[in-house]
Image (tube, grey):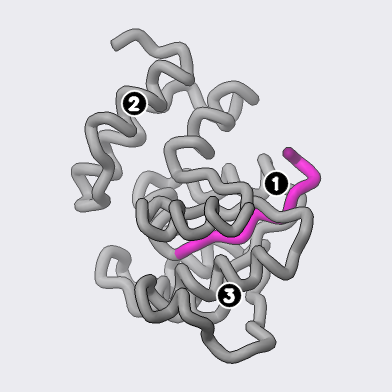
Amino acid sequence: MRDLLLIADSGPLIALASVQKLDILPKLYRRVAAPMAVINEVVASANLRPGYDLLHQAPWLEQLERSESLDALSIVLGRGESEAIHVARQEPTSLLLLDDAQARRAATALGLIVTGTAGVLVRAKREGFIESVRPLLLQMKDHGYYLSNKVIEYACREAGELI
């Protein structure tokens, strides 16, 4: 998995930045990138002080341009999500970082490999970059990031953290 290009949506980037764990992405993946629509969403985010802080924390984040006009995905998904999916379809060795359930279903239906913020944290724990998953997920939730209890419990089980 280290050799994969990680293509991120804005939600996971913002969530990881909110708990000061954005820096684990380049430790886990060879390249980390986001399409311009995602970058624009991050910059416009009211969850950070301002979104530019996130970009300053991530000089390694590659900004990808989209080569074609938006497709049918943009009708049902946000612009950032649909651009991330589109870019991932053009990159055969990519992993898509998405948390939105509808976007994940669409990406999976297109045959893309998908992970979420919780999955990244589980991997980070397994590789020794963090000590525990649960407190980080709960902090994200406290900061207003939506994570279902089901996702939190599943991630904790996967990370070997007792419930």
Q: Where does the image place residue 154, in percent across and percent down from the top left?
A: 37, 24
Say whether disc 3 or disc 1 marks the residue closer to the N-terminus. 1
Q: Where does the image place residue 7, in percent across and percent down from the top left?
A: 61, 60
Q: Quadrant of residue 6?
A: bottom right
Q: Where does the image place residue 28, in percent across and percent down from the top left?
A: 67, 40
Give the CA separation, mark 3 to mark 1. Answer: 17 Å
In the displayed image of the protein, which residue is found farthest to the top?
Answer: 162
Q: Where does the image place residue 143, in percent across and percent down from the top left?
A: 22, 50
Other-residue count near label 1 (Cα within 10 Å), few / some / many at <14 / 14–19 / ≥20: some
Say whether disc 2 or disc 3 marks the residue closer to the N-terminus. 3
Of residues 28 and 99, which is closer to you in this image?
99
* Residue, disc 1: 29
* Residue, disc 3: 35
Residue at 36% x, 52% y is 101
Q: Are marks 2 and 3 in contact (CB under 8 Å)?
A: no
Secondary structure, mark 3, is strand
* Residue, disc 2: 134
Q: Which residues are magenta?
A: 1-9
Relative to residue 135, is residue 86 depicted above or below? Answer: below
- Front: mark 3 or 1: 3
Q: Are marks 3 and 1 in contact (CB under 8 Å)?
A: no
Give the CA separation, mark 2 to mark 3. Answer: 29 Å
Say whether disc 2 or disc 1 marks the residue closer to the N-terminus. 1
Give the CA separation, mark 2 to mark 1. Answer: 22 Å
